[in-house]
Structure formats: structure tokens, C-alpha cells
Amino acid sequence: MTRTAKERIAAALLLVMALVLLLAGGMRSYKVYDRSDGEFGLLTFTRISDSELVVDATFSGVERQGDRLYTTYDRNAPRGKRSCPT
């Protein structure tokens, strides 16, 4: 094998690995808990995707406390433009 053939194989493997990691990250979801104390001591949560988490975290829609994520606004409200949580 020549050097260019090895470089092409390595580049193809890196490209495939990058695509696999992007797909795996896109399928991941997170539990975001509501702020309410919950009835009977039960916490309610909503699962959101990685892209939704990025948007929510950018606009202060979620906060991390300990190992949990908590929402700062009502996720049961109709979809559309959300009001600012502050």
C-alpha cells in the first residue's frame, strides 16, 4: 500500500466514525423535570432531544441542580413561540 492509499482509508474511517457519533448523539434524549413538588412526592418529567436541550439551555429554559435538569417554564403550554422565563 502506498501512503496515499493509507491516508484515504484513514480518512474514510474517520468520516464514518464521525457520522456514527453524530447519529448516536442525535438519538439521545434527556429527562427534564418540572419545578413543582409533584403529587405524592412524585417528580414529573419530559424527555427532550439533544437539539431541544441546546435551544432551551441557550435561552435559560433549563437549569442543572445536582444530577438533574429542571425546566424554568411550563412545558405543557401549547407549542409555538415561548415566553421568556425571566
Image (cartoon, rainbow, N blue to C red):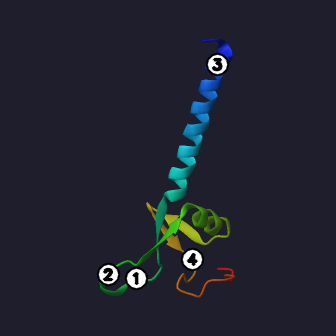
Tell me which numbered mark, 2 or 3, is placed earlier along the sequence. Answer: 3
46 shown above or below 8: below
Q: Nearer the viewer, residue 51 or 65?
A: 51
User: Label 1 near label 2: C-beta < 8 Å?
Assistant: yes
CA distance separating discs 4 and 2: 19 Å
Residue for badge 3: 5
Residue 72: mark in rendering:
4
Q: Residue furthest top?
A: 2
Q: How far apart in space, not on screen, are marks 1 and 3 (Cα)?
A: 61 Å
Q: Secondary structure at mark 4?
A: loop
Amino acid tagged 1: Asp
Q: Amino acid at mark 2?
A: Gly
Q: Earlier in the sequence, mark 1 or mark 3?
A: 3
Task: Give coordinates of residue 81: x percent, y percent.
Answer: 69, 82
Residue at horizontal 65 percent and vertical 21 percent from the top? 7
Mark 1 or mark 3, whichever is nearer to me: 3
Q: Tag 3: residue type?
A: Ala
